[in-house]
Amino acid sequence: MTASKSYAYFTPEEYLEIERISLIKHEYLQGQIVAMAGASKAHVIVTGNLSALFVNHLRGTGCISYATDMKVRLPALNLFYYPDLAVTYDDRDRLSSEDFILHPQLIIEVLSDSTEAFDRGEKFANYKTIAELEEYVLIHQNQILVEQFHRHDNLWIPQVYRAGDTIEFSSINLSCPIALLYENVAQLL
């Protein structure tokens, strides 16, 4: 006879209530609440650099850039994720008072050793179900390397950027040297 583990099931509404008062962040995976690990210094710097670039670039456009603390909800899959950065131009997100967005056009994840396989595998597969998502970007924190995926006729076309390249965030019409993403991180690599 084998024993099985049982876990508490939380509804999305219960998760959102818990998350509003929690001192740490959790993702929601089909009824389970999973605590998120802290980020490295390089991870935080890269995310901050991106946030500054995006906020300045998007000012006055109606697009909003959310860094680290905004959840993306995938209701059909019963999931909530915290991407490192998400951009939405959709009025349903911009005008909603909810603690999450549903219609991002751009999602960025800064990879860590513990999350890389999940971010490029199951999480990306789940994000692909977002109809408005045009661009998914994976940024390495231990080397200057960015992997970008663009949706084109429901196919995801990869593009790799390395040191010295200019990266194109076509979903928000922004080009910049990759060095700007890694500013103040080079000494940590």
Image (cartoon, rainbow, N blue to C red):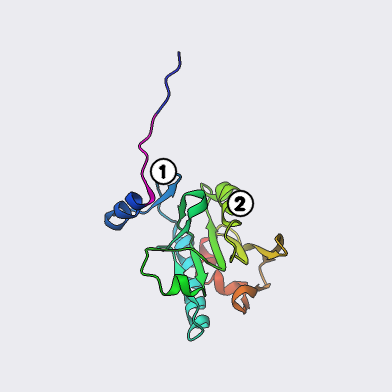
Describe the element under mark 1 as helix, strand or loop: loop
- Dot 2 and dot 1 residues touching (CB under 8 Å): no
Residue located beneath label 2 in the image = 125
Residue 123 at least partly seen: yes
Q: Position of residue 135 (x, y in %)?
A: 62, 66
Q: Residue at x 61, y 51 (%)?
A: 125
Q: Find the magenta span and give its range.
A: 6-12
Where residue 32 sits, quadrant-wise, is top left
Q: Position of residue 93 (x, y in %)?
A: 45, 70
Q: Which SS type dominates the magenta stretch?
A: loop
Residue 8 lies in the magenta stretch: yes
Using the image as rendered, state which of residue 179 and residue 107 is in the foreground: 107
Using the image as rendered, state which of residue 131 and residue 54 is in the foreground: 131
Q: Residue at x 41, y 43 (%)?
A: 31
Describe the element under mark 2 as helix, strand or loop: helix
The circle drawn on residue 31 is 1
Mark 1 crowdedness (10 Å alpha carbons): few <14, some 14-19, many ≥20: some
Q: Alpha carbon of mark 2 to alpha carbon of mark 1: how far? A: 19 Å
Q: Position of residue 57 (x, y in %)?
A: 53, 82
Q: Residue at x 55, y 64 (%)?
A: 107
Tag 2: amino acid:
Ala
